Image (cartoon, rainbow, N blue to C red):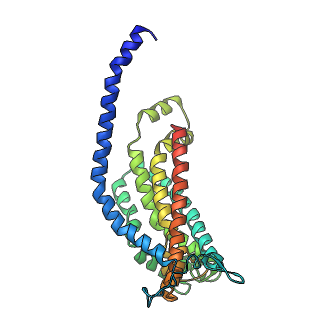
Amino acid sequence: MTDRAFLQQQADSPRRERGTRVRRRRVRAAWLFLAPMLVVLAAVAGWPLVRTFWFSMTDASLSSLEGGQFIGLENYLVYDNGWYGIMADPMWWQSVWNTLYFTLVSVSLEAVLGVIVALVLNAHFRGRTLVRAAMLIPWAIPTVVSAKIWAWMLNDQFGIINHMLLGLGLIDAPLSWTADASLSMWAVIIVDVWKATPFVALLVLAALQMLPSDCYEAAKVDGIHPVRVFFRVTLPLIMPALLVAIIFRALDALRVFDVIYVLTSNAASTMTMSIYARQQLVEFQDVGYGSAASTLLFMIIALITVVYLYIGRRQLGGGS
């Protein structure tokens, strides 16, 4: 090491120490400001979660919560001349599959349609402000209200959807959208996509508004096709906002209850994990079994969220 490099290192050492102290103070200040929120979160969410996990290891019923006996993991899986428990229940695995299928299809459609709608609303045309405001109406309507509206529209006897399809000659007879097992899942997916697409479009539109214009000016001068500009420039730049929208929608879809329960109630073809847990808790009044279903629902959502965030962070890191 030369004398000049040694002197430079000695000069930089106090600067690095000051930077380290500043970062430590910032970390302490951040934890200090977050402490009240963490305490409230632990009281509001942590305690019910722990209590639910405890109930899942008892045989408590809705009529006698305190009278339940500790039975360990029997609500989850137990062998007694055969496998019993929630993980041996075919209806539970059917609800898991329905939930994952609903999440994958609905969130994928919402992501694609949300980007398309955001690109359209980002263009300059007359009445753009009015169209942007109208786009938020489906998202602003409460889920139960919108589900009930769609239930009337999808009715097989007097619903306007069947009336329009019959008028266009696309069907020969009215379809039982919410009663037919082959159509009910697609019916709830359509309703969910109609309601949640504006949310994705809003986040993507906010990201589009922040994009630098010099990239597009350079691409226009070079004569690059707009489709190629979208996939090479626009999409990578809006990907962080799109990932945030997808994770929020995925979390909502994984614990979906209201829209499906209003449209199809406890139908096996559309039963999700939340509806399964509600059925065990309320209709069968089996708090232990229902709490086990709720605990598994929480664990599945947590696992999928961690995996998604890890993959998304790796992709963003590799892209940068």
Residue sitting at x 29%, y 35%: 22
List the single residue furthest toward the top.
Answer: 3
Residue sitting at x 45%, y 57%: 200
Camera-side residue of 269 and 230: 269
Camera-side residue of 188 and 162: 188
Reply above or below: 307 against 228: below
Camera-side residue of 252 and 138: 252
Q: Position of residue 17 (x, y in %)?
A: 33, 29
Q: Position of residue 97 (x, y in %)?
A: 62, 70
Q: Position of residue 261 (x, y in %)?
A: 50, 80
Asked whether the viewer can see residue 170, the reply is no
Q: Is residue 15 left or right of residue 172?
A: left
List the single residue furthest toward the right.
Answer: 81
Residue sitting at x 46%, y 76%: 147
Q: Is residue 80 left or right of residue 176?
A: right
Q: Position of residue 310 (x, y in %)?
A: 53, 50
Number of marks drawn: 0
Residue sitting at x 38%, y 49%: 206
Question: Where, by quadrant of the figure, is residue 135 drawn?
Answer: bottom left
Asked whether the viewer can see residue 100, the reply is yes
Question: Where, by quadrant of the figure, is residue 12 drawn?
Answer: top left
